[in-house]
Image (spheres, grey):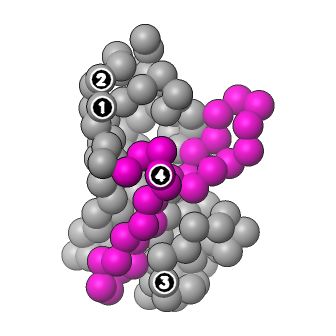
């Protein structure tokens, strides 16, 4: 089992920045890749970014490329999502997830563990 706890969400004005953190614990070695997803009210959960623990390979949704950066701290078992130039359409609950696949994973159903989520609200 892997436990994931997100933090760092909040309210920010458009153009501002937030940094989300995901602390992983448990059998983290069994989940070599991590991802961030988001879900806005009335919409499906969508992929945001992903990273592999070992090589640090990354992937991003087109909607966040150039604005969001995913990184990991292997020593602390923590994955970060730096979000800059935030837009009102970035408003959503953001979820951290862990996958047993050893590659960048963009499909939600390929993730095995999920955090509780953290709310991000961007005002215009």
Q: Earlier in the sequence, mark 1 or mark 2?
A: 2
The nearer-to-camera label among 2 and 4 is 4
State whether residue 17 is above or below residue 123: below
Q: Residue furthest top?
A: 124
Q: Is residue 115 visible?
A: no
Instruction: Tell me what residue is drawn at x 30 percent, y 31 percent.
Output: 85
Vertically, is 34 above or below 123? below
The answer to whether marks 2 and 3 mark residues whose Cβ atoms lie closer than 8 Å is no
Disc 1 and disc 4: Cα gap in Å?
14 Å
Q: Secondary structure at mark 3?
A: loop
The tag on residue 15 is 2
* Residue designated by label 4: 62
Residue 119 drawn above or below residue 45 = above
Q: Quadrant of residue 78?
A: bottom left
For disc 3, the marked residue is: 103
Q: Secondary structure at mark 2?
A: loop
């Amino acid at each position: 089992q892997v436990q994931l706890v997100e933090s760092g969400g909040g309210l920010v004005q458009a153009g501002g920045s937030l940094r989300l953190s995901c602390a992983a614990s448990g059998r983290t070695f069994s989940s070599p890749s991590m991802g961030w997803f988001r879900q806005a009210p009335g919409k499906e959960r969508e992929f945001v970014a992903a990273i592999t623990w070992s090589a640090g390979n990354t992937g991003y949704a087109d909607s966040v490329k150039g604005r969001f950066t995913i990184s990991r701290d292997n020593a602390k078992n923590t994955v970060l999502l730096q979000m800059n130039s935030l837009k009102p359409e970035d408003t959503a609950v953001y979820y951290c997830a862990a996958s047993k696949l050893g590659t960048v994973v963009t499909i939600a159903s390929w993730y095995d563990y999920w955090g509780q989520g953290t709310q991000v609200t961007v005002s215009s």
